[in-house]
Each structure stands twice: as C-alpha cells, then as structure tokens.
C-alpha cells in the first residue's frame, strides 16, 4: 500500500511539471515585469522620472500641428490634463515686454519700461 501511495504522489508531481498552462502563467509574469521595466526606462529617458516621485510638481506641455495644446500638470498625488485650443488662448491683454530667441537657442525676456 505504501508503494501505491508513493506512485500516485509522483504521478501528480509529473502531471504538474508537464502542465503547459503553468508555462503560460510564467510567461505572463515575465512579460509584466518586462512591461514595467520598459515603462520606467521610457520615463527616465524622457527626463520624466519626477512623475513617479510622490512630492514632486511637474508640468508637461504638448503641442499638436493644428495648434492645440495639452497641458499635463502633476501636483502631489493629483494628475490633471487640460486641452487649450488656439481660440481659447486668444483675448485682450496688456503688452508686458518682448521675448527674443538668441542664436544659441536660449530665450531672453525684456520687460517694457512703460507701466500702463
């Protein structure tokens, strides 16, 4: 009787080792780890690692070719995205100064001397 019990135990162990679904589950685990690693590497390559930080404040501005802008703002644990079209950005205002782009690509702001 003891021999029969050992045989049955070894058969169930062999059945578990030959189960193809266990291999699929292991592959899914490997892919999940791979996806998380790729996501973290993309964020760090773009210089957006601060998005993962708990206390950081980050603002990202994206502009489409048709002039629509998307502003993504992260403060503490809150992430907000707002879309601004060209018509929403138009309006009346007061001229504050002039911004110049230099040859090296940097920008300089020169405020107007007149205060209105």
Image (cartoon, rainbow, N blue to C red):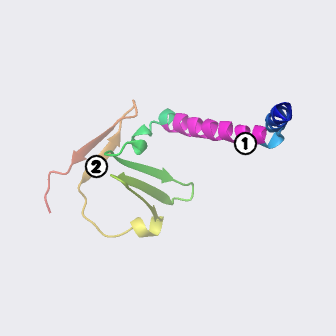
Dominant secondary-structure state across the stretch colored magenta? helix
Please tell me whether residue 35 belongs to the stretch shown in magenta: yes
Which is nearer the N-term, disc 2 or disc 1?
Answer: 1
The quadrant holding residue 109 is top left
Q: CA distance from mark 2 to mark 1?
A: 61 Å
Task: Identify which residue is drawn at 57% across, 35% down.
Answer: 37
Secondary-structure class at tag 1: helix
Q: Position of residue 12 (x, y in %)?
A: 81, 38
Please tell me whether residue 51 belongs to the stretch shown in magenta: no
The quadrant holding residue 7 is top right
Task: Identify which residue is drawn at 54% across, 37% down.
Answer: 42
The quadrant in which the N terminus is found is: top right
Secondary-structure class at tag 2: strand
Q: Which residue is mark 2?
A: 98
The quadrant in which the C terminus is found is: bottom left
Is 75 rendered above or below residue 11?
below
Q: Which residue is mark 1?
A: 25
- Residue 62 vs residue 95, the one in the foreground: 62
Task: Identify which residue is drawn at 70% across, 42% down.
Answer: 28
Q: Position of residue 104 (x, y in %)?
A: 39, 29
Circles 2 and 1: CB atoms closer than 8 Å: no
Q: How many residues crowd mark 2 within 10 Å: few (<14), some (14–19), many (20+)?
A: few
| Residue range (magenta) | 22-43
Is 116 rendered above or below residue 20?
below
In this orientation, does residue 48 appear?
yes
Q: Is residue 7 left or right of residue 63?
A: right
Q: Position of residue 90 (x, y in %)?
A: 39, 67
- Residue 19 vs residue 25, the one in the foreground: 19
Task: Identify which residue is drawn at 42% across, 43% down.
Answer: 52
In this orientation, does residue 18 appear?
no
């Amino acid at each position: 009787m003891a021999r029969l019990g050992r045989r049955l135990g070894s058969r169930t162990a062999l059945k578990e080792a030959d189960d193809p679904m266990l291999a699929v589950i292991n592959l899914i685990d490997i892919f999940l780890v791979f996806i998380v690693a790729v996501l973290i590497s993309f964020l760090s390559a773009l210089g957006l690692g601060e998005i993962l930080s708990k206390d950081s404040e980050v603002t990202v501005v994206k502009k489409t070719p048709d002039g629509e802008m998307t502003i993504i703002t992260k403060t503490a644990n809150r992430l907000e995205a707002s879309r601004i079209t060209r018509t929403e950005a138009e309006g009346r205002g007061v001229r504050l100064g002039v911004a110049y782009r230099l040859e090296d690509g940097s920008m300089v702001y020169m405020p107007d001397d007149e205060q209105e």
